[in-house]
Image (cartoon, rainbow, N blue to C red):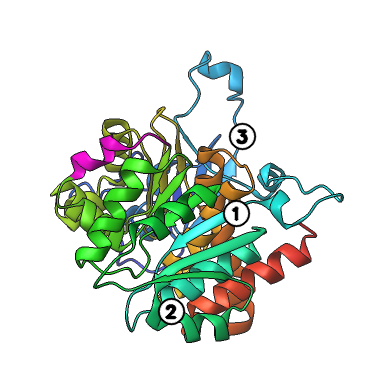
Amino acid sequence: MNEIPGKKIALDMPSGISSDTGVVLKCAFRADCTITFAYEKIGMHLFPGNEYVGEIVTKQIGITDESFLTQMPGVMAFEMEDLRFLPKRASHSNKGSFGKLLLIAGSVDMAGAAVLSAKAAYTAGCGLVRVFTPEENRIPLQTSIPEAVLTTYHPEKLDASKLSEAMKWADVIVCGPGIGTGDAAHQIVKTVLQKASVPVVLDADALNIIAEDTSVLLLAHTELVITPHLGEMSRLTGDSIAFIQTRLIDTADKFAGKFHVTCVLKDEHTVVATPHGRTYLNLSGNHGMATAGSGDVLTGIIGSLLAQRADTETAAALGVYLHGLSGDTALKKCGFRGMMAGDIVNGLRDFLAENQL
């Protein structure tokens, strides 16, 4: 049937596609347009089902909130009107009013992750960003983002007192972008997990270190947000990427519940799962954002929202949505192929300005 010429329309869901997971059940109808009823289905947005639905048109058929008898759909998605949940900014304020973020990022010859995360955090509204990074990154950081405060260390001899002082200063800690997996990085991650008293966002190499023994997540005495891509999630769970990709929501939900973290599982449509059983599926963004450093930008945005006193759930889910909108804004200037992570930061600035946020 898929080979027959002419426009193909599916009703509710294309036959052969799981409405819950997007999995192709042996064979499936590939539609040009899917007319669905009441609500869009999860499987319409998850790979590979999203390649079979075509244009999505939602029609109401009398199903109301009351129809669910208080058992509302378990997966939510942010829309433009939900930007009202961004942290409020008082006119009578100073830089301290908008939070202090400690960014533990970068390693020798790897300054870019720190630069991108710091720029994203400032652009998303954070008042103060302090970067804890090797001394070798001083010049690149001071040149690229002079607004950031620097605390540097020597990886071969980490000064634990410097790290401890910086952690006490912070309202939120972001740890992991580009830090490597050497001895110093292991010591840093262990210290953050054991001693942090403010919310912590764990990304990239911090997750690769944690993957060696995920039980260390249970040592934390504060709220944790983790932001793995599929490869990092594979290392954290021991499951293959192919297995996870067909069970994105289930994988994120189970990990969040087991380790009491907010799990931001990054994919074409990122899943945000909370330890309390609430789940979000992100519908913003585009494939131009599949570029080096895009995840560092996301981490900076989430950390920034936390620093501005957003709760963990809102910071993670709204941060992912805002990141996608930033990429959609950047797309207008850069196109898909030309987009780089720095363009997403610029897209964030432009989007916030255009919408007076």
- Left or right of residue 21: residue 181: left
x 34%, y 63%: residue: 159
Closer to the eye: label 2 or 3: 2
User: Is residue 2 or residue 325 the one in the foreground?
Assistant: 325
First along the sequence among labels 1 and 3: 3
First along the sequence among labels 2 and 1: 1
Residue wearing tag 2 = 112
x 51%, y 40%: residue: 312
Which residue, as the protein is rendered here, is positioned at the far top? 69
Residue wearing tag 3 = 60
Residue wearing tag 1 = 100
Residue 327 makes an appearance in the image? no
Circle 3 residues within 10 Å: few <14, some 14–19, many ≥20? few
Cβ–Cβ under 8 Å for marks 2 and 1? no
Residue 74 position, x and y percent, is 44, 30
In what quadrant of the picture does the C terminus appear?
bottom right
Identity, as a three-letter code, of the amino acid under mark 2? Gly
Boundaries of the magenta span: 214-222
* In the depicted structure, whether residue 263 falls above or below residue 344: above
Res. 2 image quadrant: bottom left
Whole-Å distance between the Cαs marked 1 and 3? 46 Å
User: Is residue 140 or residue 162 the one in the foreground?
Assistant: 162
